[in-house]
Amino acid sequence: MNPPPNDAPIFALERPHRDLWKYYILSSLVIPPLIPFVLPYLYFRYRTMRFKFTDEGISMSWGILFRRQVIINYARIQDIHIRSNLVERWLGLAKVLVQTASGSSGAEMTLEGFKEYEAVRDFLYSKMRGVKDPAQKSPVLSHGHLTTHDAELAAALREVAHELRETRLALQTRTKDSGHV
């Protein structure tokens, strides 16, 4: 899974897509007697829902009387799932469930109302794993194929190999001096 080449569209996401309101209306029709109670709640949830993607983490807030805000740093993210039912798929929506190591079995944050749910998932995966944009990789050395990091790793491995060789020679010399084979 490759990180998105440009994160600007994800950082620009602040509100759910208007099809989320259609989904809320359709889902409230499942139990008609509860519509007067459920629909206003879902309407205010939809109207007040806000997202904010930053370099450090993501926040989600909603609510009027009882305002709720969830903030998660990318480093705390343990797993990401996408879930959608038949109606959500018909509308082109899905929920992105973000899990942390908080001890609860459910998702810490459920991002809903995005048509770009796969791009959001890929963005979150790249941030949680610390993957950088390929254009920001360290420069190639004069070797033509090694990056600076690769060259440092190769030098460290050569040093370890040299130390092992010297240790082996010292043990061989010691064994010959003591007369044991």
Image (cartoon, grey):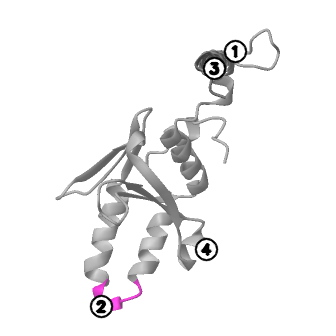
Q: Which mark is residue 149?
A: 3
Label 1 crowd bin: few (<14), some (14–19), many (20+), radius 10 Å: few
Residue 106 seen: yes
Comparing marks 3 and 1, which lies closer to the viewer? Answer: 3
Label 4 crowd bin: few (<14), some (14–19), many (20+), radius 10 Å: few
What secondary structure is marked by label 2?
A: helix
What secondary structure is marked by label 4?
A: helix
Q: Looking at the picture, does residue 126 appear above or below residue 47? A: above
Marks 3 and 4, Cα distance to the nearest angstrom? 47 Å
Let me know if residue 159 is in the magenta part. no
Comparing marks 4 and 2, which lies closer to the viewer? Answer: 4
Disc with the residue nearer the chain's start (4 vs 2): 2
Q: Residue at x 35, y 54 (%)?
A: 49
The span shown in magenta is: 29-34
**Dot 2 corresponds to which residue?**
33
**Dot 1 corresponds to which residue?**
139
Marks 3 and 1, Cα distance to the nearest angstrom? 9 Å
Q: Position of residue 41 (x, y in %)?
A: 28, 69
Marks 4 and 1, Cα distance to the nearest angstrom? 46 Å
